[in-house]
Image (tube, grey):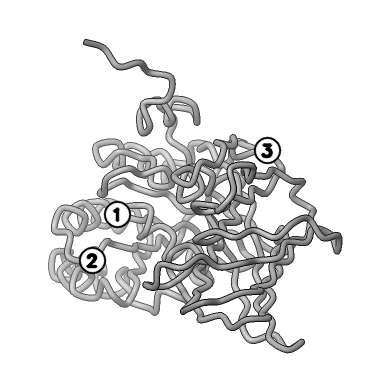
Amino acid sequence: MNHKKVLTVKRLGFVIKRRNADASRLAVEIAKYAARKGVVCVFAGESEQTALELRRALSVRTGGSKLVKIIAKEKLSSFCDLIAVFGGDGTYLSIARHSGARAVPIVGINMGHLGFLTEIKHDEAMDIIEQILGGHPVLLSKRRLLDVTLSRKSRVIYRGTVINDAVISKGAIARIISTQISINGRPINTIRADGLIVCTPTGSTAYSLAAGGPILEPSVPAIVISAICPHSLTQRPLVIPEDSEVQICLSQRPGAVLLTLDGQDAVSMNEGDIVTIRGSKRRTLGLVCSPERDYFSLLREKLKFGSRDRD
């Protein structure tokens, strides 16, 4: 579900990986360029020091103080037309989960290691920002999200949305947990394992892949269910339609169990708790893609997909 679009950007958001000097320097360089174009540069609150440095660097004639703003990260998507992330996939997820119903496009500039979401290389960053601010169309990938609800004794105690995955996993005690799985109200099976991963196609190259799950091209309308170290050789990952409703009941908990969303938020689970997961109908993610490579190029580059060891 990729398409080209011209973005009108009057306010450009900045999210910078913590304690990464290279990310801060690149962000300042791009912000200077944007400010010269009259674009308001809006920094997440945790990047306040970088924003203050930018204000000092901009000349009075550019209206530096007016063109640099600092707001809470959670409000960034409601205030900006485009958000630039300088970091790795974790930094990207930290803001994308707050994108809200507006689906503000996010461009991920890789200052980390793997970088499936932050697919723009740091030396490509200025070129793609110049293209966007110059009114040239950019390639956007529309990514599906999952809405997650945790219920306890028929009362909802937690709601969230994930870009990659929702994970139910045991704590430090090395005992397996038991979960009962239903899809669209029909019982499927009981899984005894270290945990369970329910992911989007975007998240299929994250934790699910490490647990033996399949790689899904991002436009595939599906949900993947993968067990973590299952206590059964017949338990295999399951791919189901994206309009399915998955219910997971924690039937046995020998120790602490957590529900984790995108590796960012976590909530403790009790026996009998029910996690309901379905495709989000109100939210999507607009990911700015690199013009230099497609998804399969990313697989070859990041995962060495299809390559063979050579002597």
Which residue is at 26% across, 61% downward?
17
**Residue under pointer 3:** 220
Position in image of residue 306 (x %, y %): 43, 19
In the drawing, does residue 179 fall left or right of residue 105?
right
Tell whether label 1 touches label 3 (CB within 8 Å): no
Question: In the picture, which quadrant includes the N terminus?
Answer: top right
Position in image of residue 122 (x %, y %): 26, 42
- Give me the disc on residue 189: none
Question: Label 1: how many residues lie within 10 Å, few (<14), some (14-19) or many (20+)?
Answer: many
Viewer-proximal residue among 155 and 19 = 155
How many numbered marks, from 0 up? 3
**Residue under pointer 2:** 18
Task: Determine the CA span between mark 2 and mark 3.
Answer: 33 Å
Which residue is at 26% across, 71% downward?
47
Task: Determine the CA span between mark 3 and mark 1.
Answer: 27 Å
**Residue under pointer 1:** 87
Question: Label 3: how many residues lie within 10 Å, few (<14), some (14-19) or many (20+)?
Answer: some
Position in image of residue 120 (x %, y %): 36, 40
- Say which amino acid is labelled 1: Gly
- Say which amino acid is labelled 2: Arg
Viewer-proximal residue among 120 and 157 = 157
Q: Quick one: SS at disc 1?
A: strand
Q: Earlier in the sequence, mark 1 or mark 2?
A: 2
**Closer mark to the observer between disc 2 and disc 3:** 3
Position of residue 285 relative to residue 254, above or below, is: above
- Say which amino acid is labelled 3: Val
Question: Label 2: how many residues lie within 10 Å, few (<14), some (14-19) or many (20+)?
Answer: few
